[in-house]
């Protein structure tokens, strides 16, 4: 009667296990800059004047320590035709929530032109939500809001100068004309689709 097979004595199983370990090691090494798979992360979006010399996988640091990586770089066009870079940062959960008065700098990492993103933590008691919706003219459907200080693109953007569409709330017709013009410019520039964000 033949005894039960032993993995240690089976060269086929040993070879298969070795190949599997090598494949996993190569996969982890290839994706090392993107963080380990299945590990929860904290994502933030940052608008920068330029994304020159930045690439996916660049480090994000706080006080010199690596706390995440740059996962996406997206060019966004403003209504006036100028552009800026929107950076998606994938951060370690220990950073969450990052204070709202934190600062972001893009610094050189070496003489070869490599760069990294540096975060300087603020002291505000309010922090950024994980994956929160970025409120801007090109991401949110307009919901005109009138206050004594002027006319705004959306109620969540009141007091945000980038979402102010007119200095005076009245008359209403010019305010609506400005909003229509902005939407038309974005449509001509094939901007990304906006999301509906209703205040309740």
Image (cartoon, rainbow, N blue to C red):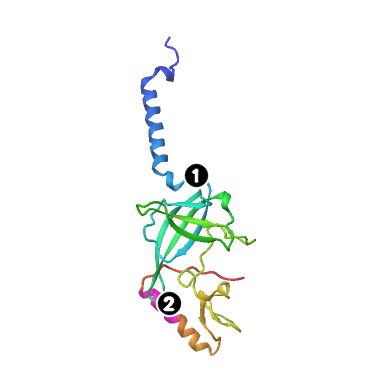
Task: Give x and y (percent) for residue 187.
Answer: 38, 74
The residue depicted at 56 percent of the width and 70 percent of the height is: 198
The residue at the far top in this view is: 1
Q: Is residue 113 left or right of residue 197?
A: left
Secondary structure mostly taken by the magenta-highlighted segment of the chain: helix
Q: Name the image quarter holding residue 159.
A: bottom right
Q: Which residue does the numbered mark 1 point to in the structure image?
A: 38
Query: Which is nearer the eye, 91 or 133?
Result: 91
Under tag 1, what secondary structure?
A: loop
Vertical placement of residue 49 versus 174, above or below: above
Residue located beneath label 2 in the image: 183
Count up the numbered dots: 2
Q: Residues within 10 Å of mark 2 (few under 14, many from 20)?
A: some
Tell me: residue 99, above or below residue 172: above
> Magenta residues, as a range?
180-188
Contact? badges 1 and 2 (CB < 8 Å): no
Q: Earlier in the sequence, mark 1 or mark 2?
A: 1
Left or right of residue 58: residue 148 = right
Q: Front-most of 171 and 167?
A: 167
Q: Is residue 147 magenta?
A: no
- For the C terminus, give its image quadrant: bottom right
Q: Which residue is painted at 57% across and 59% down in the image?
A: 129
Where does the image place residue 168, in percent across and percent down from the top left? 55, 86
Q: Residue furthest front?
A: 111
The extreme bottom residue here reads: 171
């Amino acid at each position: 009667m033949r005894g039960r097979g032993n993995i240690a004595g089976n060269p086929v199983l040993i070879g298969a296990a070795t190949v599997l370990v090598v494949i996993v090691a190569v996969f982890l090494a290839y994706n090392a800059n993107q963080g380990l798979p299945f590990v929860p992360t904290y994502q933030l979006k940052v608008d920068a004047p330029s994304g020159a010399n930045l690439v996916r996988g660049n480090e994000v640091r706080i006080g010199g320590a690596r706390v995440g990586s740059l996962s996406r770089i997206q060019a966004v066009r403003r209504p006036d035709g100028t552009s800026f870079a929107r950076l998606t940062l994938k951060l370690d959960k220990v950073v969450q929530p990052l204070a709202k008065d934190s600062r972001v700098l893009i610094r050189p990492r070496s003489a070869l032109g490599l760069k990294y993103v540096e975060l300087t933590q603020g002291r505000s008691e309010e922090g950024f939500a994980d994956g929160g919706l970025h409120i801007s003219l090109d991401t949110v459907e307009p919901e005109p809001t009138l206050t004594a200080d002027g006319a705004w693109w959306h109620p969540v953007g009141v007091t945000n100068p980038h979402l102010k569409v007119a200095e005076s709330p009245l008359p209403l017709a010019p305010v609506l004309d400005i909003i229509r013009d902005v939407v038309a410019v974005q449509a001509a520039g094939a901007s990304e689709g906006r999301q509906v964000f209703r205040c309740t």
